[in-house]
Amino acid sequence: MQVEFQFNDERAICDIAGHETLLAVLRDKLGAMEVKYGCGEGACGSCVVLVDGNPLASCITLCASVDGSDIMSVKAPDPPGAWALLKDRFAAHEGAQCGFCTPGLLASCFALVQRGEKLTRQEIREALSGHLCRCTGYHHIVDAVEEAMAIWPTMS
Amino acid sequence: MHCEVFGLYPYPFDYFRPNTLEEALVLAQGDGMKFLAGGQSLVPLLNLHVAEIKGVVDLQNVASALKFVQSQQDRLRLGSLWTHDELSHSSLLGGRCPLFSQAAAFIGHPRIRRRGTLGGSIAHADPLAEWILVMTLLDPQLILASAKEERQLPFHDYLLGPMMTALSDDELITAVEISLPEKATYGFTEVSRRPGDYALVATALSVGWDRDRIAQADIAISGVSDVPRTFPSISRDMCQEYPSHGLVEHIKHAVEAAVDPPSDVLAGASYRRHLAGILVEKALHQAFDEMSNAGETAAKSIGKSEGERT
């Protein structure tokens, strides 16, 4: 079957089979290597992309089910600068070490920041609880997100 | 056909996305078809090659028809495709049966809660799932539809064992119908290794009230046997009693004595027994506190209206 969706502001038309996951199509057909295969169970969050603005685990999302959607990864064009702000704060706080979890984490953080959420540290931890990071111990990530949330309203 | 590709992704199957419930039920009559709701349990099983199927019937275009709340005096009928996230807002049920929002908050993490559904979880029937525990406690009627017929099945006849149910391959859970006592409060609590993990032990309980005296009670616990279990005789001990510290202690010790939990890599039997007692104690306090809070609010509003009259 044929599906059509926006991926990082470009139109993507793909011939796919029913069983192909969004992750498989993004990586193997569209070459989006920033989307990572972690656990395959939707538990680790490294494959998270934004589908119509909502963070979704692409490894457990069938590509056929997102036909017509608007999909964004960490490499999306970024005129308002929210991705850049998050990347900058992650770098400044050393919120990424090996970097495998980072694209997925940034996608979830992007959704939070874009919605103008202002969360406490505990709420940030809860909001990001679907992401596993085996390097940082999360502390640096929470620092980065907390700061990005404080800065974003002054930028937008 | 590269095996390294199949090592990561599901084996091939077909995909259908019907626009009506009738169409979906007809499609499901095909050999090896599975309904796809939120996909938070089914697709992992497909990725891991635990399940093999011929095709999925994606319910996203019929979801709105299966998101409803019908509230009657003594019962509540809930559509099956509410997501955990939607059920975590107590306003959805108009404040009735807050157990749903209490339990939903413990399910997985935010991303799972936004996708996963009540009906999907009941169909999957993981014995440690929060909804399976809640259903064991409330024992609702499940409304099951196929292209041929619609039938009702009480939950205790539906759950046959861990991940085993009386649901036929072509049947869809369309709704859950719960009988509610006139005045009840609830408790729900669990312990897991990390937030979002399946619970080691979880407890759900309901307390029905006759003024400030306990009229009826039910207790259900998961993680201490292969599927969640209830404690009818211990629950009966609470009837006609007033909430007290002594009563909580009595129930806690009775539950500890009654459970015979398994030992596994996550927790030993004695630790699970300890948790069962602690969690029942906490859940009872939740239910009692909710009752006394409600009583205070009612007393205040009465006081206020009397004040207004004078």
Image (cartoon, coloured by chain):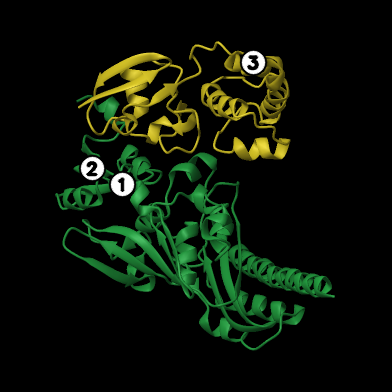
Instruction: Output the chain of dot 1.
Output: B
Query: Element at badge 1?
Result: loop
* Residue at position x 28%, y 46% in the image: B51
Vertical side of B131 occupied by A116: above or below: above
Query: Element at badge 3?
Result: helix
Quarter the N terminus of chain B occupies = top left
Q: Are marks 2 and 1 in contact (CB under 8 Å)?
A: yes
Q: CA distance from mark 1 to mark 3?
A: 39 Å
The residue that mark 1 highlights is B62
The residue that mark 3 highlights is A85
Q: Dot 3, crowdedness within 10 Å: few (<14), some or many (≥20)?
A: many
Instruction: Please name the amino acid that badge 1 sits on.
Output: Val
In-image side of A138 versus A21 (left or right): right
Instruction: Please name the amino acid that badge 3 sits on.
Output: Leu
- Name the spot of residue B120 as percent of width and height, x first: 37, 52
- In the foreground, B188 or B224: B188
- Name the spot of residue B250 as percent of width and height, x first: 68, 81
* Residue at position x 45%, y 23% in the image: A36
